[in-house]
Amino acid sequence: MRKQTPPRTGGRKSGGFCPRAWPTSARNETKGKPPMTQAYYSAVLDHPLDDVWSLIRDFNNYPAYIDGVSESEIEDNRRGDEVGAVRRFCYLGNWIRQRLVGHSDDQHSLTYAGLEAIPYPQDDGGPSPAPTRYQGTMHLRPIIEGNRTFIEWSVALETEPADAERWKALFASWIPDWTDSLARTLARTRPRSR
């Protein structure tokens, strides 16, 4: 199958170039919905809630805090905090589209859903799990002692039952990496005085 190269347009960039799109064969064409499984991770970030929220609240700000995201743009000139906005971003050389389905400045949370099912990364050459659809939520809470932030990041996965554990394990390894990337960005861009 021929890879498509999306047009380079405006949007946020973090260096690098994203040359290819997810293959269209990765889309889930099943009629019925498989059961959901969930990957969950929580951590304490050594930064005030307002600092963390100001970095992640803009749905288009992914390149600023997720290593491996080289560029991002919001389609149709919508705002990065507007429910319904679609971001198109390049992660590790693959184009991904997600819709912002929930956003609350009061609750310091945002929820996004993948618009296409994503394929399982190639691993040992054995049979790969079927592509999965997903919905993720990032929720921040203040920790009064030390003026820090508690982050919860969960991803609900719509997978075939036989594939659920492999997908859950994969996201359970990715989410801590993404959270660590966020923590490194905060330490670099918003250093705390001791």
Image (cartoon, grey):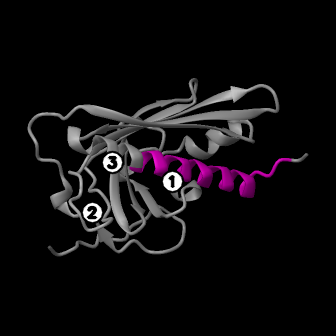
Residue at image coords 69%, 27%: 142
Nearer the N terminus, badge 3 or badge 1? 1
129 sits left or right of 93 in the view = left
Identified by mark 1, the residue type is Tyr
Residue 166 got which mark?
A: 3
User: Taking 105 as reference, is 186 above or below it?
Assistant: below
Is residue 96 positioned above or below 140 on the image? below
The stretch of residues the image draws in magenta is 170-192
Dominant SS in magenta = helix
- Which dot, 2 or 1, sits closer to the camera? 2
Residue under numbered circle 2? 22
Image x and y of residue 193, in percent:
88, 47
Q: Quadrant of residue 105?
A: top right
Name the amino acid, label 2.
Trp
Question: Is residue 179 within the magenta segment?
Answer: yes
Looking at the image, residue 57 sits to the left or right of residue 33; the answer is right
Rounded to the nearest whole Å, what is the CA distance between mark 2 and mark 3? 20 Å
